[in-house]
Image (cartoon, rainbow, N blue to C red):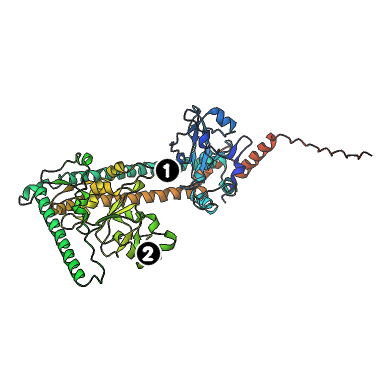
Amino acid sequence: MKEDWTESILENFISYNGVFSDGDWVEKKDQDVNGEVRLIQLADIGDGNFRDKSNKKLTIDRARKMNCLFLNYGDILIARMPEPLGRATIFPLDKKESYITAVDVAVLRPNACSINSKYLLHLINSPSIRSEIDKLKSGTTRKRISRKNLNKILFPLAPLPEQQAIVKKIEGLLSSLDHSVESLTKAQEQLKIYRQAVLKKAFEGELTKEWREKKTDLPTADELLVQIQEEREKHYEKQIDDWKNAIKVWEEKGKESEKPKKPSKPTNLDFKIKILDDIASLFKTPKSWNIQHLAFISDNRPNSIVDGPFGSSINVAEDYKKEGVPVIRMVNIRPLKYISKNLRYIVKEKFRKLIRHNILSGDVLIAKVGATIGDCCIYPDKEPEGMLSTTGSCRIRLDSNVYLPKMLQYYIYFQKYKLKNIASQTAQPFLNMKVLKSYPIPFLTIKEQHQIVKEIESRLSVCDKLEESIVTSLQKAKALRQSILKKAFEGTLLTPQEIAACKADPNYEPASVLLEKIKAEKAAKEAPKKTTVKKKPKKRVAKH
């Protein structure tokens, strides 16, 4: 411990008129959209910043009847639930409105004469205190820290002038750091916009305009369409003829073996599937291109487009094993990237029963539920045969002579926001298979697809390198922030000259003296407790 520093629990930083309390338990029945009191919630509590997101209210009468704690400007708010657990901010709103806070937020109103609120804020958000909070968390599904446990943590306290000097230096350093982070974050957003601009030009034919002008021998999409359709129909007709011949042989042999199954009609020959015209009408493509639905480019085999099995098909507790056939979950399907971590497995016997949901190298995987709708990747080469996990994901096996997996992957990524918009708007948005199969796609020659992919990747590879550099810089900035806070509360952030200037301040006194003053103030303001003497009950005298 540094000279003249001390450490103590939060309760000892509170004077007679201070607060260290949980927020209020406010239920839906207590709320009123026209109320005058705003309910500050966990979503408002940032890591050192106030997010100002909530809009729930209740009336002033209801808040008073519930004996709610009203917030003051400058109160420290501590989130007792993630993420991250224990993050704190200073309440910045003035008295134009009345405010209370939710029960999972602790309110701290320290003694202003002895404790600098910003010093305490940065201290709560520092790595050492965050680590202590993590040790004292509890709960099963959602971790939290109780106010009682918060009050077990020892907080280092510096003399008041030193607190003020530490805050000034922290905020000077963090201001510069925040400016850098803001610039990096802005650059990240600009990269996203650039990526979308590249893909827009790609799928409107702009990137290959000059290439097409030079390739005068290419068939149009309409000509190609007729050719593909004829070949597919002939292929299916041959399958039917082979099946009929197999039936004859089976009958001639007395039907002793299992009856040959009639080949299923491939999804790409299902003429009931219609293009979503309202989306197709928005497309701007070259004259030599065509618009088809997603099912058209799928493989000739049955089950070329499937989602995962229903939840009842797999018992997670019993069927998931440590080895076997990998089960590809939505966490493995990321935008333009397959993540092979955190895999689950099922035994081969179980897999054989669910074989229609299998995944092979080159298959395109799409997430189709919740916030992940439109996340898309290609199942890589050299990966073993796998299986989809649930109906929240989909596998598309393409006709390799018609469409490139990379072409589809980039296109789905480009269409992510449109796919989200057409998903069923329920509590958990869901993209059904009928919509997905009908979704319009640009149809063009495989040669031009190769050229488009080449043009896209030459541009996006530059973006990826810049993104990687930005992410590294942001990680360094985060580490530097933690380093600044760590040094501040170890007492090593200020230089010897800065500490000497603090000691020369007429208000300088050891931190232990500050706590003694707070303690004395509390004692002086405490009302003397009335002592009441219990009267002994009179003895009853039995009547004779």
Name the spot of residue 38 as percent of width and height, x first: 49, 32
Point out the tag, 2 or 1, that comes first from the N-terminus: 1
User: Which residue does the image show at 43% across and 62% down from the upper left?
Assistant: 318
Residue at far left of view: 217
478 and 274: which is toward the camera: 274
Name the spot of residue 232 as percent of width and height, x first: 14, 56
Q: Quadrant of residue 502?
A: top right
Classify mark 2: helix, strand or loop: strand
Is 355 placed above or below 539 here?
A: below
Left or right, 184 with respect to 492, comes to left
- Amino acid carrying mark 1 in the image: Leu
Name the spot of residue 105 as percent of width and height, x first: 52, 41
Instruction: Give the CA distance from mark 2 to mark 1.
Output: 49 Å
Regarding residue 314, the answer to whether it shows in the image is yes
139 and 51: which is toward the camera: 139
Left or right, 147 with respect to 432, comes to right
Q: Which residue is mark 2?
A: 346
Is 25 placed above or below 316 here?
A: above
- Amino acid carrying mark 2 in the image: Ile
**Contact check, label 2 and label 1, Cβ < 8 Å:** no
User: Which residue does the image show at 10% across and 48% down from the upper left?
Assistant: 222
- Report the number of discs: 2
Q: Which residue is mark 1?
A: 174
Image quarter of the C terminus: top right
Regarding residue 491, the answer to whether it shows in the image is no
* Circle 1 residues within 10 Å: few <14, some 14–19, many ≥20: some
Classify mark 1: helix, strand or loop: helix
Q: Label for residue 162?
A: none
Name the spot of residue 241 as percent of width and height, x first: 15, 63
Q: Nearer the viewer, mark 2 or mark 1?
A: 2
* Circle 2 residues within 10 Å: few <14, some 14–19, many ≥20: many
